[in-house]
Image: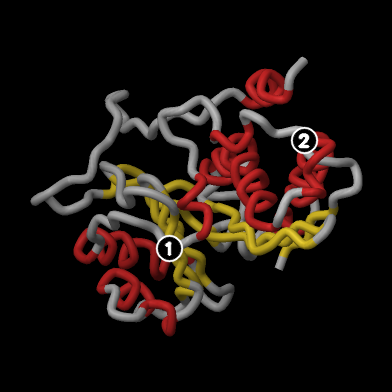
Amino acid sequence: MGFLAWIQKQFGIPMPIANEDGQVSVAPNEERFKILRIQPTPNPDAFQFILNGKVIGAGTKTFDSPDDAGDDPMAQAVFEIFGTQSIFVKENFVTVTKSDVVGWHTIMEKIGTTLEATLQFYAQGDEAENANTVGDKDVHPVLEDFNKDDFFYYDEHKKIEVVNALLDIAIRPALANDGGGINLLSVEDKTIKVHYQGACGSCPSSTTGTLQYIEQFLKEAIHSEVEVQAS
């Protein structure tokens, strides 16, 4: 079985985000975003706010502190809510992670109304994965001629392309369902360094079961000697 056939058999292909009516969402122009539902994530300190359309054209946006907010109106306003720890934007949702000093019953409604009042469509994200996101094609072009035996001979740029493409297919869609994401930091020799985003950032399972799953997948897809480290 070829590499592409193995990928497609194991994981399928990510599909466009659809709204509750089954239609693929597009960015609203004049109308404000509305929250369709709020759902928990595996991280008890993070909730996922599902919007009525795509909130970002490509990639992700992460705000890990008020300093990251810059001049972004939404991030500034949400960080003004006591207890907000981080904000993660992807596809049609925003994940807000709080500190354990406050309860959700005191801030959830305020976060929701603040998002609806301040959230604007982002044409582009700010993460490295943006350049390698799978779109209408079945797989990223870099995987079409990928040979596992050659991986350690690739330059760093191509190694990153390969790993990002694999994460797009097999890992990021699942993490997005739980309100999180993963950013590839570097590929150094046999060590792959990643950074969790959104709900995954402070979730206990991210440093145990999830990390083990990601490492096992990349061992099978790339090489048995690769090691994955999270920061």
Q: Is residue 122 left or right of residue 12?
A: left
Q: Residue furthest bottom?
A: 67
Residue hosting label 2: 221
**Amino acid type, label 1:** Asp
Quadrant in which the N terminus appears: top right
> In x, y percent, where is residue 134?
49, 37
The label shown at residue 20 is none
The label shown at residue 126 is 1
> In x, y percent, where is residue 173?
55, 39
Say if 63 sits above or below 160 in the image: below
Say if 26 sits above or below 40 in the image: above
Viewer-closest of 183 and 142: 142
**Which residue sits at x=76%, y=51%?**
211
Residue 219 occupies quadrant: top right
**Amino acid type, label 2:** Ala
Q: Residue furthest right?
A: 225
Residue 200 occupies quadrant: bottom right
Q: Is residue 19 left or right of residue 126?
A: left
> In x, y percent, where is residue 30?
8, 51
> In x, y percent, where is residue 37?
35, 44
Gap in Å between the C-alphas at discs 1 and 2? 27 Å
Viewer-closest of 203 and 75: 75
**Which residue sits at x=72%, y=21%?**
6
Which element is circle 1 on?
loop
Say if 197 sits above or below 224 in the image: below
Q: Residue furthest left?
A: 30
**Which residue sits at x=29%, y=57%?**
122
Q: Is residue 176 left or right of residue 202?
A: left
Figure disc tally: 2
**Which residue sits at x=61%, y=48%?**
161
